[in-house]
């Protein structure tokens, strides 16, 4: 009987701590938003973070986009060829990239490339008691450290996703038109006929913006709540990638259902 | 890294993002087909619009002359009301007829305009009187089945195909 009640208590404890975690997450989000005036007052801080998060991620995003485009071109050609409609390859590549792969794969890479470094940086600041020292000097660490990083990530993510999609479309064009020899006119005109600026391109940008907010916030939250030990920081970094990826994939399903269901 | 250098690279990064978005909108998307020429609106009533969608092209002789602006249902006439935005330089006679056609076997549906011979032209807010509905595949099949069954009944041939062949031979 006591074993059973312990199980039930453990379940309850897990549920309560999950809700508490969500609450702490939402409160950190609110605290960052409330202190976002620093972005306008000291834009240099945010620019530095855009440089750190965005520019340094360009290489991995560009190369990944190129190869995803190559593979989409090859696989799409293989399937479309059976139905004699290879010209639709451009449409297939552009729609898959702008709607899904661009925002989602970029967000996954972003969690791995930029999210981990944000978590580790803040976790180590906390372990080295730099954040506590800031508070002693009456500098608000959320204002000075978290808010610029948050907005840096939110600005960088849609840019990276757009670059990913563009490079991917060019990769699909290279495989389809240059290597396989699909008619370039049909390739582009089918693409332009089927990709809508608002329904597809703009919705993709909205998706990438949402993913940027979520992934950056998860990374900051994990660093902010990490235990101030080497092990705690390493765990927080792992959790950033795991929860970031899960949040992106789950949200992607929700957003897709909302945007493209009609 | 100095401040100016950081600023420069961040500016370049943002510019790259804008270029990528412009590429997606203009080269991959249909932004370039958005026309900003002034348009005038005319109405047309159809018995059945089939799979016609908003922003579908309006073509005359195969050339795009406008877009479908809105599709609604008129509860007085029990017909679909389609609003067409025609581009200003193109003028059509008042007795122009509109029909809903399909590009290719499985392609998208569009509105085709066939000009009439009236002296007066359609103006903003005008109505196209002569319309032809979209072809619905089920209706077509049921008509075919009905007519072949009828033939079978009158000729009492061995099968519908044979009856049709006989009818064609006569």
Image: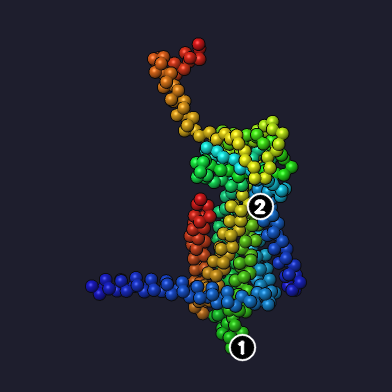
> Disc 2 versus disc 1: distance between alpha carbons?
48 Å
Give how far across and how far down residue A141 sits, in percent: 59, 81
Are labels 2 and 1 on one chain?
A: no
Give how far across and how far down residue A223 sits, in percent: 54, 74
Please say if the residues under marks 2 and 1 sit with CB atoms less than 8 Å apart. no
Q: Is residue B160 above or below residue A4?
A: above
Mark 2 secondary-structure assignment: helix
The colour scheme is: rainbow
Q: Is residue A176 above or below residue B14?
A: above
Name the residue that disc number 2 marks: B24
Give how far across and how far down residue A92 sits, in percent: 58, 45
Q: Residue furthest right?
A: B4
Residue A66 appears in the rendering: no
Q: Residues within 10 Å of mark 1 (few under 14, many from 20)?
A: few
For residue A1, which quarter of the picture?
bottom left
The mark tally for this picture is: 2
Give how far across and how far down residue A25 sits, in percent: 50, 73
Q: Which chain carries label 2?
A: B
Residue B83 relative to residue B142: left or right: right
Name the residue that disc number 1 marks: A137
Residue B163 appears in the rendering: yes
Q: How crowded is mark 2: few (under 14 residues within 10 Å), some or many (20 or more)?
A: many
At 69% across and 54% down in the image, what residue appears? B22
Q: Which mark is residue A16?
A: none
Mark 1 secondary-structure assignment: loop
Say which of marks 2 and 1 sits in front: 2
Query: Which one is nearer the viewer's eye here, B126 or B17?
Result: B126
At 56% across and 45% down in the image, what residue appears? B71
Residue B153 relative to residue A85: left or right: left
Q: In this view, does B44 lie above or below A123?
A: above
Query: Which one is nearer the viewer's eye here, B58 or A253?
Result: B58
């Amino acid at each position: 009987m006591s074993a059973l009640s312990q199980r039930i208590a453990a379940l309850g404890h897990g549920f309560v701590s999950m809700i508490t975690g969500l609450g702490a997450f939402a409160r950190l989000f609110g605290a960052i938003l409330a202190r976002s005036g620093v972005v306008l007052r000291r834009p240099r801080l945010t620019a530095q973070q855009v440089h750190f998060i965005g520019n340094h991620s360009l290489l991995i995003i560009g190369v990944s986009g190129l190869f995803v485009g190559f593979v989409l071109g090859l696989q799409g050609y293989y399937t479309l060829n059976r139905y004699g409609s290879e010209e639709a390859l451009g449409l297939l590549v552009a729609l898959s990239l702008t709607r899904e792969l661009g925002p989602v794969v970029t967000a996954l890479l972003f969690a791995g490339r930029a999210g981990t470094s944000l978590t580790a940086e803040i976790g180590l600041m906390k372990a080295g008691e730099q954040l506590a020292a800031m508070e002693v000097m009456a500098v608000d660490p959320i204002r000075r450290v978290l808010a610029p990083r948050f907005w840096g990530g939110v600005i960088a993510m849609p840019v990276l996703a757009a670059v990913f999609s563009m490079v991917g479309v060019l990769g699909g064009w290279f495989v389809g038109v240059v290597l396989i020899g699909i008619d370039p006119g049909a390739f582009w005109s089918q693409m332009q006929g089927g990709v809508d600026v608002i329904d597809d391109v703009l919705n993709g940008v909205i998706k990438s913006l949402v993913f940027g907010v979520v992934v950056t916030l998860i990374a900051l939250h994990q660093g902010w709540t990490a235990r101030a030990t080497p092990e705690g920081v390493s765990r927080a970094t792992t959790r950033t990638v795991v929860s970031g990826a899960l949040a992106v994939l789950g949200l992607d399903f929700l957003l897709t259902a909302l945007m493209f269901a009609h | 890294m100095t401040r100016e250098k950081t600023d420069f690279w961040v500016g370049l990064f943002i510019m790259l993002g804008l270029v990528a978005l412009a590429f997606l909108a203009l080269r991959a998307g249909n932004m370039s087909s958005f026309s900003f020429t002034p348009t005038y609106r005319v109405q047309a009533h159809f018995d059945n619009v089939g799979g016609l969608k908003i922003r579908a092209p309006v073509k005359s002789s195969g050339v795009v002359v406008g877009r479908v602006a809105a599709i609604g249902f008129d509860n007085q006439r029990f017909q679909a009301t389609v609003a067409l935005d025609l581009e200003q330089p193109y003028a059509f006679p008042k007795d122009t007829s509109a029909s809903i056609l399909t590009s290719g076997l499985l392609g998208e549906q569009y509105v085709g305009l066939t000009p009439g011979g009236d002296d007066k032209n359609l103006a903003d807010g005008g109505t196209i009187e002569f319309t032809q509905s979209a072809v619905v595949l089920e209706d077509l099949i049921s008509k075919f089945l009905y007519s072949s069954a009828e033939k079978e009944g009158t000729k009492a041939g061995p099968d519908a195909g044979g009856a049709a062949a006989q009818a064609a031979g006569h």
